[in-house]
Image (cartoon, rainbow, N blue to C red):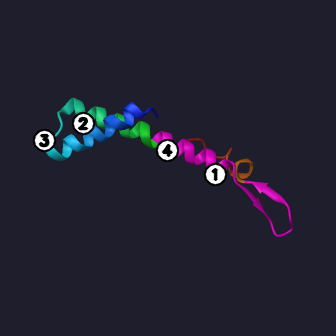
Amino acid sequence: MEQAKIDRINELARKQKTVGLTTAEKEEQQKLRREFIATIRMNLRTQLDNIDLQQEDGSIINLGEKYGNKTKH
């Protein structure tokens, strides 16, 4: 997500706390928040898919290969 969008989210949050938001600004805020959350989930999923676990028998299992293909976000 671009820094300009994150800055806009923060700007709208500050405005909401002080003077309130118009209907259009509320819709924009919700859209930006949904996009932000989707980006966070995608980044987390990517990190989790790249984790390798070593089993007691010495074998290494990649979590992305084991669990990553079952659910798509």
Give the amino acid type for the residue marked by disc 2 in the picture: Lys
Report whether 38 appears left or right of 9. right
**Residue 46 position within the rendered picture, expressed as x and y whole percent measured from the top left:** 62, 44
**Residue 2 position within the rendered picture, expressed as x and y whole percent measured from the top left:** 44, 32
Tell me the residue at 67%/47% (across/down).
Answer: 68
| Residue assigned mark 2 | 26
Eyeballing the image, is 48 above or below 33? below
Question: Does 41 appear in magenta?
Answer: yes
| Residue assigned mark 3 | 19
| Residue assigned mark 4 | 40
| Residue assigned mark 1 | 48
- Tell me where the magenta segment starts and ends, as one range: 38-62
Q: Nearer the viewer, mark 1 or mark 3?
A: 3
Mark sitting earlier along the chain (1/3): 3
Give the amino acid type for the residue marked by disc 4 in the picture: Ile
Give the Cα distance between marks 3 and 2: 13 Å
Report whether 16 appears left or right of 56. left
Give the Cα distance between marks 4 and 1: 12 Å
Give the Cα distance between marks 2 and 1: 33 Å
Secondary structure of the residue carrying tag 3 is loop
